[in-house]
Image (cartoon, rainbow, N blue to C red):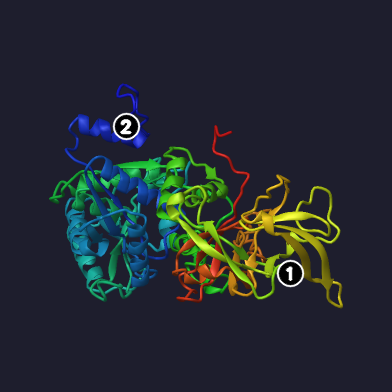
Amino acid sequence: MENENEAVSRNFIEQYIDEDLKEGVYSSVCTRFPPEPNGYLHIGHAKSIILNSSLAEEYHGQFNLRFDDTNPTKEKSEFVESIKKDIAWLGADWKDHLYFASDYFGTMYEAAVGLIRAGRAFVCDLSADEIREYRGTLTEPGKESPYRNRPIAENLDLFTRMKNGEFEDGSRVLRAKIDMASPNINMRDPVIYRIAHMTHQRTGDQWCIYPMYDFAHPIEDAIEGVTHSICTLEFEDHRPLYDWVVRETSKFMNFKSRPRQIEFAKLYLTNVVTGKRYIKRLVEDGTVDGWDDPRLVTIAALRRRGYTPESIRKFVELVGVSKANSSVDYAMLEYCIRDDLKQKVPRMMAVLDPIRLVIDNYPEDSVEYLEVPNNKDNPELGSRRVPFGRELYIEREDFMENPPRKYFRMFPGNEVRLMNAYFVRCTSCEKDADGRVTVVHGTYDPASRGGESPDGRKVKGTIHWVAAKTGKSAPVRLYENLIDEEKGVYNEDGTMNINPDSLEIREHAVMEPALFDAEPGESFQFVRTGFFSADPKLSKKGAPVFGRIVSLKSSFRLPGAK
């Protein structure tokens, strides 16, 4: 039991929330995750999902899932459904608090009209290039639009006509009237509505004007009663505009709350592709087989590969919450899934590059069954009966005719342990016309059943195997990093350094028969090889296709670990 007097470490967001509750700024806590449905979520989004939902849970508050669907040019219902599936899989429960920005288009329009009536917004006829030119620079103030001081009545008329579809895309925008001399460029009369004659995936052709994110987002938060709008650091310079929109529209709109924006550092992983437009390019050019290709780090891809929600939550916990951007080694994510699975899943035998081993002194046509624990570190997983016979398959790399020093596996004259079975001494090998070894021969010690010898002699090598008579063949997919790690992810021209060897398919791996009962998505440890999952997209009942989740070992160590 923890010492009740021991100080509990609180991240800076929790400290802000504690302070707000103590001072009575808010009586309860409401957070939200606001994805734009223009692609699949990736590991970086997982941090935000888990952070926001965990804060709501910690403070017995409310967690909202809200789709910021204000840009119909890129949004699809497919992405909406994938995002909902990902968030639910991670264990973030929005209950009945599912919302869409498009639910509030009428309210946002009303808020924009209110700003016009208050003299705080105007219709501008400058082109996008002209607005950019008038905006100024980081060292020079902007220049006011010649349309900035249009009469309120004219602005109201023009904005109504924009809504009614009288003007072409790009011909006019609605801008907030703030301060063209502000040191923060975001406050220099930002565009808050634009014309876009596009069919929206939810509202159809009801609207031909759409709010900009910086205007829509604070209003959505205020409508829903969000108290703490947790976002990433790139929005820090947008916070004054967020506060301005809430403050000015609250003067005439009946909102539930005055939300507070708090920024935290994004999650950056080394040598992976996270940008949606880059992932989309990989999907569209066929480099990967979809948004859920196991070589990607979309949440759907990690799930398909065999990652668990628990491993991703552990990863987010280890990364922590910070105000400073930094990169995290992908090996930390691999550590988390390895640590999560090692006691959860059965340890089975599969030979990925098989070569035949014949035990010459074992009775022909005889099959015996060995009782093998499913996981020695977790007795609750029980045991299984594994067939053994005269002919087996072993890994090709477990035999060398002329081995180097400290090679303790099979070579002529050497004795090894067949895992959970017998001691076997290698006697010879057969080769084909090209000199390639095709069969290894050996003899076994019947007294060493179970893997130990009564005379106490020791062997240094232990190898796994699969009985040839009962073993079955299945494809195995071995994944490496999609990116060439030596070159980095991106080139200056926006291309990516793709590793041409990121996927290796072993079509004829041989496995013990129990693995063919695997359900799609079920995971195992293949002894001495790695953790594998029956690919839920490619596997069928009785015909699994296994993909490697992660290898067994890594050089990664947690800070402070020995």
In the figure, residue 361 lies in which quadrant? Answer: bottom right
Q: Position of residue 550 (x, y in %)?
A: 56, 56
Residue type beneath disc 1: Val
Q: Classify mark 2: helix, strand or loop.
A: helix
The one of 330 and 529 positioned closer to us in this rendering: 529
The reply to whether residue 309 is visible in this rendering is: yes
Q: Is residue 171 above or below residue 376?
A: below
Q: Residue at x 67, y 66 (%)?
A: 500
* Lower position in the chain sequence, tag 1 or tag 2: 2
Q: Is residue 317 above or below residue 9?
A: below
The reply to whether residue 146 is visible in this rendering is: no
Task: Return the residue at label 1.
Answer: 358
Q: Residue at x 36, y 51 (%)?
A: 49
The one of 62 and 415 positioned closer to us in this rendering: 415
Q: Is 392 situated left or right of 162 in this image?
A: right
Q: Position of residue 183 (x, y in %)?
A: 40, 40
Q: Residue at x 68, y 48 (%)?
A: 454
In the figure, residue 424 lies in which quadrant? Answer: bottom right
Q: Is 473 situated left or right of 139 in this image?
A: right
Q: Quadrant of the C terminus?
A: top right
Q: Mark number for residue 15?
A: 2
Neighbourhood count class around disc 2 (C-alpha, 10 Å): few under 14, some 14–19, many 20 upward = few
The one of 358 and 246 positioned closer to us in this rendering: 358
Q: Classify mark 1: helix, strand or loop.
A: strand
Q: Is residue 444 above or below residue 166?
A: above
Q: Position of residue 266 (x, y in %)?
A: 45, 46
Neighbourhood count class around disc 1 (C-alpha, 10 Å): few under 14, some 14–19, many 20 upward = many
Residue type beneath disc 2: Gln
Q: Quadrant of the N terminus?
A: top left
The reply to whether the C-beta atoms of the residues labelled 1 and 2 are less than 8 Å apart is no
Q: Is residue 490 above or below residue 501?
A: above
